[in-house]
């Protein structure tokens, strides 16, 4: 079965689209994935959507501003699927299902909800392919965190590899998250959580001060000095001592005192914040992993990788490319996998991954209506 996965993450940098050959248990990435970056205009629109959602403080789907953002977001994802199919010489009828994550506007599992936008029915009708969206709500409604959902894909993807070392897969996206994989390789033994910030706070800091999208190759952080006292203050947040599973909103941390730092010292301290949170989170799992594989955009930032290496002890980190994975498209592949699992009614979240009380299927199926 060939399926498509679409991810628009908390970095707000664009849409990742990937193909996966999967029966919902075994997996094999297929063809060439695509990344369709957001224009500055769309990024601003998404930021406005996030700000509007924060003002509401709860899902208000009838707000015309939010509906407009959803429409543009959905159009952009439809373009990504069309590009993916044409780049790979595929037709719509060769795709069994699309996993459409959408864009998270607000995430408040403690209040019993999480809010992703993206019009799955419009996508199904336009492309004439079944679409699965809204992957997180079922888990949150059942008392789970609704995130991370990628761990079962990490497990399926690692399953073919020899060896039974305890592993961690660390994703440094907008928010960073970690999947801990036990030697048993059993889904019931998975443990995961969001570790803390990834790139989103750093991106926001760089954009605010320079108008650039990110700290390209760690250029600003490299010239700065980490304010360890301020970092210790940020790390005093109770979140970092809570046991997994646990999850974060993109804007869960407010980083007081940051504005007093220079551009470079701010970049260095935010980069260290991401790394220190990863290092401290690894101590919360039952056993220190024998290897840590890093995926997500943060692995392209050499200063961030050095900070992670320096702060994890004992450190045994390498990018996921060292095990043959494509580290920029793991999440898109994961949503292709989760969509097929939804069609088969297989669970996508587990007590150890989201804190839900039993393995839980998730996602809403949208079948194309004939026009
Ligand atoms: N060369 C680079 N130098 C510095 N930072 C980089 C580089 N390449 C990518 N990044 C960072 O990675 C980010 C994109 O990461 P990624 O695509 O994993 O985010 P995401 O899909 O939004 O993640 P998530 O869904 O996990 O929150 C960029 O916004 C940028 O901050
Ligand atoms: C609510 C939400 O959208 N969470 C995202 C976010 O981005 C990274 C981190 O926080 C992660 O837990 C989750 O996404 C990934 C894809 C997941 O569910 O596994």
Image (cartoon, helix red, strand yellow):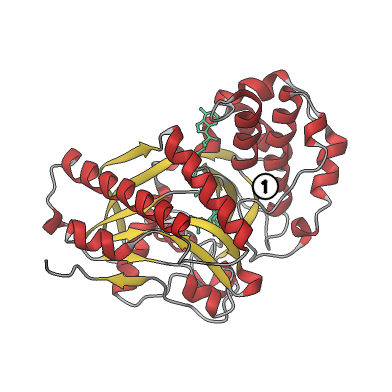
Q: Please, what secondary structure does the residue beneath circle 1 have?
A: helix
Is residue 167 visible to the viewer in this orientation of the structure?
no
Q: Position of residue 253 (x, y in %)?
A: 72, 50
The residue that label 1 is drawn on is 278
What residue appears at the point 60 percent right and 62 percent down from the top-left corner?
A: 56
Q: Quadrant of residue 64?
A: bottom left
Q: Position of residue 329 (x, y in %)?
A: 39, 45
Q: From this view, report whether residue 172 is shown above or below residue 209.
A: below
Q: Is residue 270 left or right of residue 9?
A: right
What residue appears at the point 26 percent right and 45 percent down from the top-left corner?
A: 79
The number of callouts visible is 1
For the residue pair 239 and 39, the one nearer the viewer reads as 39
Q: From this view, report whether residue 76 is shown above or below residue 244.
A: above
- Residue that extends furthest to the top in the rendered view of this protein: 223
What residue appears at the point 40 percent right and 53 percent down from the top-left corner?
A: 68
Q: Quadrant of residue 314?
A: top right
Q: Position of residue 12 (x, y in %)?
A: 49, 43
Q: Is residue 72 left or right of residue 45?
A: left
For the residue pair 287 and 140, the one nearer the viewer reads as 140
Q: Position of residue 63 (x, y in %)?
A: 48, 62
Assess disc 1: are there few (<14), some (14-19) or many (≥20) residues with their C-alpha within 10 Å of its C-alpha: many
- Residue that extends furthest to the front in the rendered view of this protein: 64
Q: Quadrant of residue 121?
A: bottom left
Q: From this view, report whether residue 239 is shown above or below residue 306.
A: below
Q: Quadrant of the C terminus?
A: bottom left
For the residue pair 93 and 333, the one nearer the viewer reads as 93
Is residue 60 visible to the viewer in this orientation of the structure?
yes
Q: Is residue 361 left or right of residue 228?
A: left
């Amino acid at each position: 079965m060939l399926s498509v996965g679409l991810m628009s993450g908390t970095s707000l940098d664009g849409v990742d689209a990937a193909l996966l050959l999967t029966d919902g248990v075994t997996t094999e990435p297929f063809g060439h994935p695509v990344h369709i970056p957001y224009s500055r205009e769309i990024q601003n629109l998404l930021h406005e959507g996030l700000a509007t959602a924060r003002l509401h403080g709860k899902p208000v789907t009838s707000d015309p501003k939010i509906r407009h953002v959803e429409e543009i977001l959905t159009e952009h994802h439809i373009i990504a699927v069309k590009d993916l199919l044409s780049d790979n010489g595929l037709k719509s009828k060769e795709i069994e299902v699309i996993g459409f994550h959408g864009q998270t506007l607000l995430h408040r599992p403690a209040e019993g909800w999480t809010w992703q936008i993206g019009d799955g029915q419009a996508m199904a009708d336009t492309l004439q392919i079944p679409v699965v969206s809204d992957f997180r709500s079922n888990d949150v409604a059942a008392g789970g965190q609704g995130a991370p959902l990628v761990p079962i894909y990490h497990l399926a993807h690692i399953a073919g590899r020899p060896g039974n070392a305890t592993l961690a897969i660390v994703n440094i996206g907008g928010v960073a998250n970690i999947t801990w994989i036990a030697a048993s390789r059993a889904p019931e033994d998975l443990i995961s959580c969001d570790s803390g910030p990834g790139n989103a706070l750093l991106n926001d800091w760089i954009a605010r001060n320079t108008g650039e999208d990110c700290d390209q190759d760690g250029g600003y952080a490299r010239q700065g000095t980490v304010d360890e006292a301020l970092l210790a203050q940020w790390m005093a947040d109770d979140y970092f001592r809570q046991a997994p599973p646990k999850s974060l909103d993109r804007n869960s941390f407010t980083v007081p005192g940051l504005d007093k730092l220079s551009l470079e010292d701010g970049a260095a301290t935010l980069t260290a914040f991401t790394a220190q949170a990863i290092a401290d989170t690894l101590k919360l799992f039952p056993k220190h992993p024998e290897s840590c594989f890093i995926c997500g955009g943060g692995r392209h930032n050499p200063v961030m990788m050095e900070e992670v290496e320096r702060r994890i002890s004992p450190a045994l980190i390498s990018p996921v490319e060292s095990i043959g994975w494509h580290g920029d498209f793991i999440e898109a592949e994961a949503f292709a996998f989760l969509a097929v699992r939804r069609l088969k009614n297989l669970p996508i979240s587990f007590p150890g991954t989201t804190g839900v009380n039993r393995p839980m299927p998730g996602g809403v199926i949208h079948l194309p209506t004939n026009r």
